[in-house]
Amino acid sequence: MPLAKVADWYLKADLNALVSETRLTLVQIAAELGVSTRTINNWLSGETRPKAGMVARFAQICGASEKRINFLVHVVNQLDKGTVVSDLDKRNIFIVERAEATAGEFWKFEPLYVHGPLQDRRYHTEMLPGLGNSTPNWQRKLRRFQTLQNRRPAPIARYLMSSNVLRRLRGWEGAGGLFDHLLQVDRWPNTEIRILDELIYGAEHAFDIYLPGGFLKAPPSLVYVETLDQSRHIEEEATVSLYTDRVKRMWSAGQRIGGRLDDWIR
């Protein structure tokens, strides 16, 4: 199914983010691209859409990484074809990052690992198979953490993890530090972490739900799902409602994190 709303939102949101991240003015960016500032403003407002080549130059001028540029080009190319394909090759983490930075409300469920932006460096290094030596991946998680920590006004943030996530920490020397870190996050404004200690149908894979929550720059309602062989975004209203109803039932069965780690992993 086409994902036009999410893709259109992402393109506009990331172009605006690039402008906020660069020291260049719109006049300077326009001069580098050989277009008018009015054209730039039309792209930023979503009134018109730049072609893939122009998007790549825009992002490069603003200092974007090669991966970020490539994903923007991917989104524009898919929009031009009338559909948006989500796959593991693209990972779509850029859409997740932008949604975390702008959504008014989000729910995250994780059955196996601590949520990416809530991990500390030792957990990332020692507990994730195949990722321990990936400094860029850790830096990305740290940026996501800092973005969430500094958001004002704070969004409604709900993090739900299976109790297996904590049980996997048994015997690991960094467990206490990570647990204290999670307790600190749980004290952020409008933020809560719960642990789910039972099996619930539909809780076999990780997923995120992002909702506007009245925030003007927020994405349209969407679900991000990541399994072993694919990652995808869902924006069909009925499916988003299905996931939202499911996570709220799971949430009601969870317990707020607190106390001592030993109480959770015995």
Image (tube, rainbow, N blue to C red):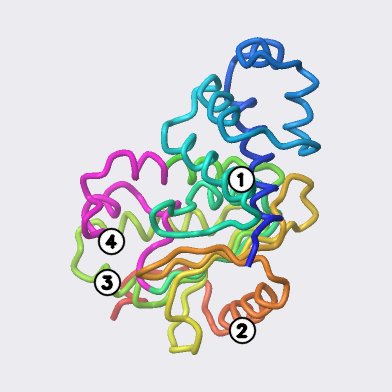
Q: CA distance from mark 2 to mark 3?
A: 24 Å
- Asked whether the viewer can see residue 159, the reply is no
Which marked residue is nearer to the observer: mark 4 or mark 1? 1
Measured as percent of width and height from the top left, residue 104 is found at 71, 54
- Between disc 2 and disc 4, whose residue precedes? 4
Residue reaching furthest to the front? 81
Identity of the residue drawn at 27% across and 71% down:
168
Q: Quadrant of the C terminus?
A: bottom left
Instruction: Report the residue marked by disc 2.
Output: 249
What is the quadrant of residue 221 in the picture?
Answer: bottom right
In the image, 216 versus 125, the foreground residue is 216
Disc 4: CA contacts within 10 A as few (<14), some (14-19) or many (>=20): some
Q: CA distance from mark 2 to mark 4?
A: 28 Å
Identity of the residue drawn at 69% across and 39% down:
12
In the image, 48 versus 100, the foreground residue is 48
Which marked residue is nearer to the observer: mark 2 or mark 1? 1
Q: Quadrant of the N terminus?
A: bottom right
Instruction: Report the residue marked by disc 4.
Output: 175
Q: CA distance from mark 4 to mark 1?
A: 28 Å
Residue stretch rendered in magenta on the structure: 112-141
